[in-house]
Amino acid sequence: MRAALFAFASVLALTACSQPAAQTDAPAESEASGPATTQIAAPVYPETRTVEQVDVYASAAEGEVAVSDPYRWLEQDVRVSEDVANWVEAQTEVTNAYLDQLPGRERIAARLAELWNYERYGLPTTRETEDGLRYFFSRNDGLQDQSVFMVQDGLEGEARPLIDPNEWAADGTTALAGTVPSPDGAKLAYLIADGGSDWRSIRVMDVETGETLSDEIEWVKFSPLSWAKDGSGFYYSRYPEPEEGEAFTALNLNQAIYFHELGTDQSEDVEIMADPDNPEVGWRGFVSDDGQYLIINSSTGTDGNGVHILDLETEGAEPVEIFSGFGNNHSYVGNDGETFWFQTDLDAPNGRVVSVSLTDPSALADVVAEGDGPITGASHVGGHLIIETMRDVASAVSVYTPAGVFVREVDLPGLGVASGFGGDPARSETFYSYESLNQPPALYRYDVETGESEVFRAPELTFNPDDYVVSQTFYESTGGARIPMFVAHHRDVDPNGVRPTLIYGYGGFAITRRPDFDVRRLQWMEMGGVYAIANLRGGSAYGRDWHDAGRLANKQNVFDDFINAGHALIDMGWTSPDHLAIHGRSNGGLLVGAVANQAPDLFAAALPAVGVMDMLRFNQFTAGRFWVDDYGSPQDPEMFDVLYGYSPYHNIPETGEYPATLITTADTDDRVVPGHSFKYAAALQAAETGDAPTLIRIETRAGHGAGTPVSKLIEEAADRWAFIAYHTGLEIED
């Protein structure tokens, strides 16, 4: 089993012969001093009504603070409120009218489809059957809205489709959200996501016949799925069924672990672990590699978890507590009988791997000690431990014996991201992917015993990765912090002080935005733009201390880091404020909103996507309560002062020139509910922020991002690139 620290941050929120790009799509050489020369009519915003809504908060500095919330009504679900639905329709009409005028949008979409049209594979999952090894993996032929799930008997066997989600919905918005084969490879449990929602349904398929069995599990969210050793059923986590009309807005409480026996109704599922007296505690269960134990993780937020272990083969056994409380992160790596290996940051900000015995769960022994770089993953494969770390954000992977003796380092292709390394403790075969900002994921087969690595799958591309340059630089921010940043561009593009440049950032929840591949970024570079990823505090680039330096009362450090990334690119000679844009999603959307408020004159354009914009009410909806670990609670007087001080919705400048802003959200986002973006857009449109437009693009039957069909992703990217190209001076011919 591959370990990953159970921070649960996902709650917030792939070398072959290459073909050069067409000559007409070479980088633009525009050196315009401002927006492109084509003139676009200014938008006329729909009138957004206000309401008399004032909330009083306890403040450490002021005692009490009355806060107006005139757009509270926009928090309602678009499926429930006709008024909100009408507002969305009116805003969409205005946004579409503006986007339709942007030069080059159709050309961008067409070229992006060409770039996206390459074969992509997911990492294989292997099961041992009576006839040999069976491999399960996903495949996309290029422009399929959803990847097809495949099965193949043996490395040389013929792959056949097992599940094609493209057949589930005409608009491609019903997605395969997870797959777990049974231990013998005969059955496949899979999760379905509809319209981008975080809610999941579970179904089961017979692998040989392709028949879907009668099992139907509903109201699953933020849950692993783990089979019993004998394949009789599986463990999963779910919430109670929401009240009618509240599925996409109500708080997620009272999660519990259940066991489902194949062939039975969900109503008969056995509750394994719950805590009704503490409804905010979430529970998730993983069966050990040997099938004897259930590893039970508990948490109340995104940072820190407890761990219990339940012996599944001893009748009447009680869970044994291994790690108590929620102050640190711990993940199961593997076990040998009653001896378990865990990845933990307990007394180790950069992480370590420890062993612990069920006979003495209080005694931890270092197996792989804390090092200079943070451990990002660990797995038990082929009688070895595979340890993944970050070195200045890029991947490094090492192999150890179970006793902690170093064996070797895995030789990676370059400055990029390696992931995977799952497998069976008894087999030396594992798979991993490697990618970089200019290189799509290639899959490798690795022999843990010999150290031999070979290409397993590599895509044939419609572009040449060598046409793009990826470098890493470091700049100074608040308090002397040294911030790493990746800068990527076409090899024909040099600093000239006016290059259209886009900075991407996140800065929270111990999530580090690494130099992975995204074909949309590559297109921006092909067009002549510079792309930068700033590795801000609040992530995990340098371990837990780096995370702590950007959360709670330290959140302003994140915004300072992002602002200073802009100054660094200007100082490096790449760009200027008239040509600089910023982009972020989810917590990164919050980042963009806060930074645009604090330094509006530094940026020409801003792209806040599915952002957390109301920092006083984020914990009132769906998964928002989990985020208190990173943000703090607005009901805490001291944290209220911090949150109110940077909340994008509450801190829009009263006057001045504001960046051109394209807000993006989706009507089925039940992670960061769209009300955040709705209220922010309304407030920004009502403010005196200059002549630059404020638009909101609202996708239908889409959510926080996962499962969005390729066709919708292309459309959104074309709108985004056309918008910032126009406002940063990157000219594109129609």
Image (cartoon, helix red, strand yellow):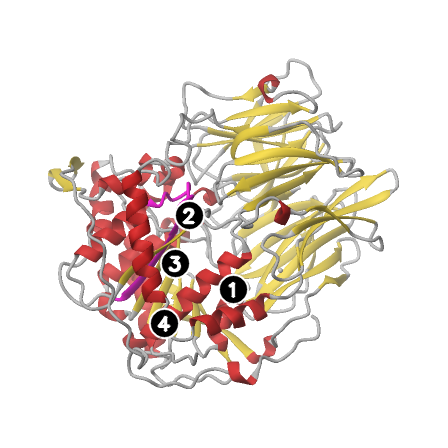
Front tag of 1 and 3: 3
Q: Where is residue 139 in the image (x, y as percent from the top left)?
A: 68, 55
Q: Position of residue 570 (x, y in %)?
A: 33, 77
Front tag of 4 and 1: 4
Disc 3 vs disc 2: Cβ atoms closer than 8 Å?
no
Q: Earlier in the sequence, mark 4 or mark 2?
A: 4
Q: Where is residue 252 in the image (x, y as percent from the top left)?
A: 42, 31
- Residue underneath mark 4: 102
Q: Earlier in the sequence, mark 1 or mark 3?
A: 1
Q: Which residue lies furthest to the top in this view?
A: 316
- Residue underneath mark 3: 584
> Residue 499's image quarter?
bottom left
What is the distance, in whole Å, between disc 4 and disc 3 at their CAs? 22 Å
Q: Residue at x 65, y 68 (%)?
A: 413
- Rendered position, 229 above or below 155: above
- Residue underneath mark 1: 515
